[in-house]
Each structure stands twice: as structure tokens, then as C-alpha cells.
Image (spheres, rainbow, N blue to C red):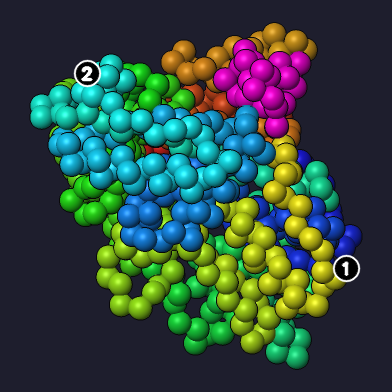
Amino acid sequence: MNRTTMLQQLDETSEWDIIIIGGGATGLGTAVDAATRGYKTLLLEQHDFAKGTSSRSTKLVHGGVRYLAQGNIKLVREALKERGLLLKNAPHVTTSLSFVLPCYSWGQKMYYGIGLKIYDLMAGNLGLGKTKIIGSKKAKELLPTINTKKLSGAIIYKDGQFDDARLAINLAQTAVENGATVINYCKVVQLIKENKKVNGVIVTDELSNKEYRLKCKVVINATGIFADEILRMDDAAAKNIVSPSQGIHLVLDKIFFPGSDAMMIPKTDDGRVLFAVPWHNKVVVGTTDTAIENHSLEPQALADEIEFVLHHINKYLDVEVKPTDVKAVFAGLRPLVKKGAANKTALMPRDHTIIVSGSNLVTITGGKWTTYRKMANDVLTNAAFAAGLQKKSCITEALKIHGWVTDTDKNAPLHIYGSDALAIKNLCKQDKTLSELIHPLLPNIKAEIIWAVQNEMAITVEDVLARRTRILFLDAKAAMEAAPVVAELMAKQMHKDNNWMQQQINDFNTLAKQYLLS
């Protein structure tokens, strides 16, 4: 996956079947679907793949227990099916995980136990395991730091976990392997119209400032929280359809939450659930649900949100988590679709919405990571119809995502799983210095940085430390300390000078400080 090669295709292609704006979960999934159906496909992302919402999730592939409680049976059933398919199609970046739901009365055990049994049944033959009711002693064994005061027992159920940004990169690779062109740092600045119908885009390469006029048969707006901006390119008077909601996560060392199981707190003060999830030898705690008026690629955690998460996790643990214990804090925005007069974002539906405008601009927003493949299928079917493209069937239900390996192949010595781990090992054989760690507290080696530049379109130090590896999201201080090593490795690969290196380090440190509480 080479950016220079991708850019050349912009000059060489007179017309695309489909141009997708947005390189997050939905856009990348749509590119995979379109390419595998045989459509000439181009995806354009203004920053880096998964820079926004799609790298900032709770890292869960799930049906949504709280949506079941809200009575949204359709969404839960759909998400449980997609959960099962994703675990089959991308086992290298997904896994099943046991969740422990602590209960403080017999009634809670019955209520949540029955609800989660229904959750199991709805998954059908794609289920991950049976729900069990356990006593307080067993709950303490599974969650060693759980507060046992008044603890009656717990429910154990199975759900899925994944690495969101890594899956996004693998989807981009899958799309390219099936004939798509995908380009990061390429911003759509204007829609092109002919006879009042959208038939192309004007794009600026953010790295070279070169402008491209690109023609196509249909444009798909898959920009998530930025969907309204593209809609206004089509119609300046278009009303907003997205109501962004912010969720934050705190990342802690495993000492506060040892063990291999996750914890789900079923009801917080604002009606959401709260998770404590082991991830890459840390634990991710979240999330919140805060209505936000303004959106950005780097949303900031609010003081009230941080206090909310610390307050709730400390209610359930017998060890105190202080702000100084937080290794990283990250915030993400959900592109919730406005529905009626709902004023609590926690109650807004996570279903996706597709709009085909009078100009044939096709917009999709809403939804969640788990259902990205179904969203892609739905929007592509609508877009193909709107553009009069030849009807072709979706084949992604059984499509293996780039990096796919069997379970036995997961035992690679590198912390990166998947078929690329073998190629990274070969880099180390060619140059033994590439097997060195980039930081003494991190498992990542220098070869991963080289691989990310050569094969994953990593352009900046942030791309590598935030999304090709997940270091910024796991330990922001360690990420800042690793930045000079990463910048030097990238500079050699990309033929950049010392000024570029220093600018990259400075830019990254400015960004990383926003992920620290102290």
C-alpha cells in the first residue's frame, strides 16, 4: 500500500464508478465492499485513516447490551450477527472476551442474568459462549480488585474485543488488494456538478498542495461527524443531521485491574454502561456520553467527564484510582443521527441512516464499529442504484480481512498478530538492529516502524504512534519519549532532513500532552 502509487492513479483514471469521502470504519468498509463487487473505487481521507472516531472506541465488538434494555431488538440482532462475522473474518485483531457484571442483590442477578441469556439466544450459531451466574467468591477470583461490600455475585457473559485502528488499516489494505485506490491526507474541498447532479469532487493533496478534479458516477459521503459539512457542499441550506456525542476513556496500568476478564457496570448516573476492559496489557475504562456542539479531529476530555469515570470506577474497586495514575486519556465523538426531540444522547439510537439527495449525493452516518460491514453493504447498494451501476452482489460476509491468520498462527513472537508479523520478522533478519525496542517499557520494535512507512501509508510520527501502533492511547508519556527514535527511523525511510524530524517531534509532543492528565 504505497501513497505515491495511489496518487498516480488519480492522474491515470478518467472516471471512477464510486468516490468515497471518509477513511473511517464506514468509508473503509464501503471501499472493501465496492472493490470486491468489481466497481472502480476511490476513497479519500482528509487526514489519516481512522484519525477521528474510528480509533477512539471502547475497543468492543458487541451487540450492545444497553440497546437490548432499550428494546432495540433489530439493532442488537444485527450487531450480534456482525460481531460473529468479524471475529471469523479478522481473528488477528479480534478476540472473544469474558465480561463480569457485578450484582448487589438477588434481584439484580435474576434481572441481568435473564437479559443476558436472551442476548446469547439472539446470537444464534454465532454465539461466543453461555452466560453464567456466579457467587461473590468466584467474582472476587475473576476480578481481584472488585469491592466486595454487599456483593451478591455476578453474571459472566461473552462479547468481542478488537483493535479499532489496526482493523481500519487492514481494511484499507484489503480494499487495495481488491483493486481500490485509497489515499490519506487528501481533502475534498468541493463537489462537482453537471445538470444539478454530483458527478465528481475537487481534492487537495494536503502534503503537496496539488489539486485534482476527479469525475465519478456517484459520491458517497461517509465522513461521520463531518457529514453535515459535505451535505452543505451539496446544498448550502442543508440542515444538520448529526448530533455529536463525546465519549472519553481513561487508560490505567493492569495493577488496578489484574486478571484477564473485563467488567461491565450496567447502569451509571447518566443511564449508560461503564466498562473496564483489559487491552494491550493495560486497562481501558469508559465511557461517557456528553452532547457536544462543536466537533474536531482531536476532541478534548472535559474535567466533568474525567471525574465521572474516576468516580464510578472507584465505587466498584477496592483500590483507589487517582488522576495521577492515568497513563492516557482519549476522547472520541459519535456521529449520532438527530431523531425527534431526544435531548439525552445516551438515548439516541445507534442505527445508521442513509440519505440520497436530489443531486444523487449519497450520505451515510450513525451506526457503530461492530456493524460497519452491514452499513457498507446498505450504502453501496443504495449508491449503485442511484448511479445506475450494474447490480452486483455483496461478498463480504465471508471475506477474510488482510492479516487473517488461524488461531495457531497467533502465537507470533511479535506483539503484532496477523500475516504481516512474518514479514516484520524477516525485516529483523535482514537488519538485526530492527529487532530493538523503541522504548524500554514498550513491546514495539523498530521493524514495525519501517513496515508502517513502507506498507501502511504512515506519513507522520503521529500516524505511527497513535494508529499503526497504539502507544499514544496506552501510555502518552512513553509515546513522547519514543518519538525521537520513531522520527529518526521514518526520516531515513522517507529521505527527510533534521528539520523535518524536529518538527515532527515537536508536533507530536504538543498533541500527546493533550492525552495526559498531569
Secondary structure at badge 1 equals loop
Image position of 364 with respect to 239: above or below? above
421 within the magenta span:
yes
Asked whether disc 1 touches disc 2, contact meaning CB atoms under 8 Å apart, the reply is: no
- Taking the view exactly as shown, the residue that stands out farthest to the bottom is 195
Q: Residue at x 70, y 32 (%)?
A: 403
SS at mark 2 in the image: helix
Q: Indicate which disc residue 137 carries.
A: 2
Q: Please say whether residue 426 is visible from this viewpoint.
A: yes
Q: Which residue is mark 1?
A: 14
Q: Residue 413, image x and y in percent? A: 62, 12
Q: Is residue 181 visible?
A: no
Which circle marks residue 481 in the picture? none
Q: How many numbered badges does the structure rendering display?
A: 2
Furthest toward the left, the residue is 150
Which amino acid type corresponds to the residue marked 2 in the rendered image?
A: Lys
Crowd class of label 2 (few under 14; some 14 to 19; many from 20; radius 10 Å): some
Vertical arrangement, residue 378 with respect to residue 155, above or below:
below
Q: Which of the pair 126/232 is nearer the observer?
A: 126
Range drawn in magenta:
404-427
